[in-house]
Amino acid sequence: MTRPGMNLWLVVLAIFPALSSTGQSQSQSCPINVNFSDGTLTHWEAYTGNNKAGNGPTAIIVIYDSSQSSPVGTIGATSFPEYNLPGVSGIRVITSQSTDAFGGFQTIPTINGYAYRYSILLGSTSVSTQATNEPSNGPPGTTVTPVNGPQGGYVRGISRLINVPPGPSTLPYTMTYAYAMVLENGTHASEDQPMARAIISTPGGVINCASPAYYLPTNGGELDSATARANGFTPSPMASPNPSRSQTDSGQHLQDVWTKGWTEVTFDLTPYRGQQVSVTFEADNCVPGGHFAYAYFALRDICAGLQMSGDTITCSNSVGKYSTPSLSGASYDWSVPAGWIIDSGSNGNAIIVTAGPQPGWIVVGEINSCTSLTDSLFVQLYKGALPQAVIDPPDTTICYGETVPLHALITTGTDYTWIGLGSFTARNKGTISSLPFATTVIAAPEQTADYILTVHNEGCPIPIADTFTVTVVPPVRVNPGNDTLVVAGEPLQFQATSSDTYKDDYQWSPSTDLSNPNIANPIGVYGPDMDSLSYLVKATDTFGCYGTATVKVTIARAAADIFVPNAFTPGANSNSLFRPVCFGISSLEYFRVFNRWGQLLYNTSQIGQGWDGRIQGKLQESNAYLWIVKGTDYTGRVILKRGTVVLIR
């Protein structure tokens, strides 16, 4: 997209020295340092300014001459400050790799198999209408200008005159650049939004189709997020380092920064052989000045026409990617060898293909209103085809302690190997004598583990690896409660639980005298003719895994009562805890122990708990102690008893 009136201008850099051409033998060489290969801006012109009056020639205020040395010129220069903001870099050559804080992309890209060596950063997070020396948290700026400073946003750019070498029009001469950007949404009209752009000009004017502008589109002043995403922008998780000046959210740091990762663009200079062409890269804040823009640009050092990337030798049946740098507003036409399949991307600058049985040419054509470019790549095939196998099951879940067979049917391959983090049995590697070949291993992991089948095929150096994930459900541990005593005829409430985090199904066996053997909490009522009964409780989870435990019930024929011993021996192997024994008691109101002066030594309301003969950890002397207990049986009858107990040491 272009903005009317925004990119139809050209700063003629008449002071640029003409770059000599040494003839046809070097006709495809790129200009010296066009890709910042010496780490400086030498041969480039740089400029900064302010767009208060709009973007265009009037926005350029300071020009750094390509024929002079730093600091007034670009020879040997590595950076220049924002206009009228000496503490903040507005133009900087990037020579070491890092990650952009807002976009998360690398500051020096590798795209389509080509590793750029350097890039240049145009812009910062600074804006022109903040308080004096207010910090700017995001990269790369650190301060901003006074609130009463100049209105309008910062403008920064670099330009270069290129002498396109003479030669036949059939011999392509192209240049490829990559760009990435971070733009704060200003919700202005589109032509006033923060932006980055490339401008390619000849003595006859701007080459519009090779001079795209990149900005966040708006509709009626509101961000058109759907179009922005379609154009490759995504919102940054980081908030703006600059506070909003909107009346509705004044002072807030909004999450209104959008980014676009590295994208390559090719422009064709073949029609301009023997002529001089100007290349300009620029990043501009919004025209009102309150929202920032910065962009990275990098250039290839190959000018030999369209460059397709992808493997030049592969195995039949393999899946690969082939791509070219894009053309602005271009359409694409791909063709592949007979028997090959384009899986996706036939309408773009990158395709995914499945190789067929024969080698051949992959050809791409890119056409826009500027030019038509074609490139081709001959792809050879290895002698052997890519291995192929079908696995069953690809993933499965088993209970702890179980095993599972893992099957694979190999239809192309000469040998195979199984590996696994968990244990497994059966043959785990071997040579394939005939196809199709079936292999099975028995997996027996104690915890979730991956099992990997790797298959090779002689003549193809590319193996395939299929991963089986065996998820192991942890053991289900069941707690049916403690063994208990109950009086004949009195109801006993059970409450079984399990270690499973999901809902379990319960089954009690035998079901004798239970209200419902298929729930966690049945009620049992027992007659006087039974002495004891043991239950097996089984809890089964949603995967069919289960655990079991037993609980024993002893039935007393006497009426419900509370029995309290008359002596105990703390620290002994038996009879070391002084506690009441409850038969048919549904609740214990209290059990208390006193010394002979009436001081309370111990108190509990929990059935089964008792006194260990210690006070604050100190074992008491041998003596007689008083106790009192009160409880309620299953019929509601209250039982109250008192007595003495002898502590024996």
Image: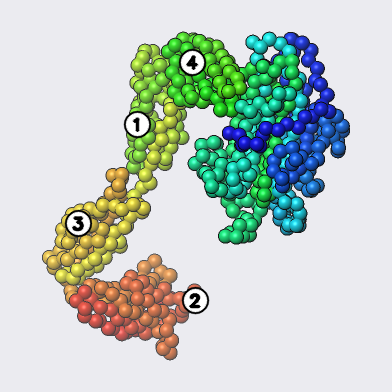
Q: Please name which of the two marks, 3 or 1, marks the residue nearer to the observer.
A: 1
Q: Is residue 507 above or below residue 17?
A: below
Identify which amino acid the numbered label 2 is placed on: Gln
Residue 328 is left or right of residue 82, and the answer is left
Distance from Cα at disc 4 to Cα at disc 2: 88 Å
Residue positioned 64% across, 20% down in the render = 268
Identify which amino acid the numbered label 4 is placed on: Ser
Identify which amino acid the numbered label 1 is placed on: Pro
Residue positioned 37% across, 85% down in the render = 626
Q: Which label is found at residue 517? A: 3
Q: Position of residue 450 (x, y in %)?
A: 44, 34
**Residue tagged 1:** 393
Q: Which mark sits nearer the N-terminus, 3 or 1?
A: 1
Distance from Cα at disc 4 to Cα at disc 3: 70 Å
Residue 73 is left or right of residue 359, and the answer is right
Residue positioned 36% across, 47% down in the render = 475
Task: Identify the secondary structure beneath mark 1.
Answer: loop
Q: Nearer the viewer, residue 587 or 219?
A: 219
**Residue tagged 4:** 335
Q: Quadrant of the N terminus?
A: top right
Residue 178 is left or right of residue 435, and the answer is right
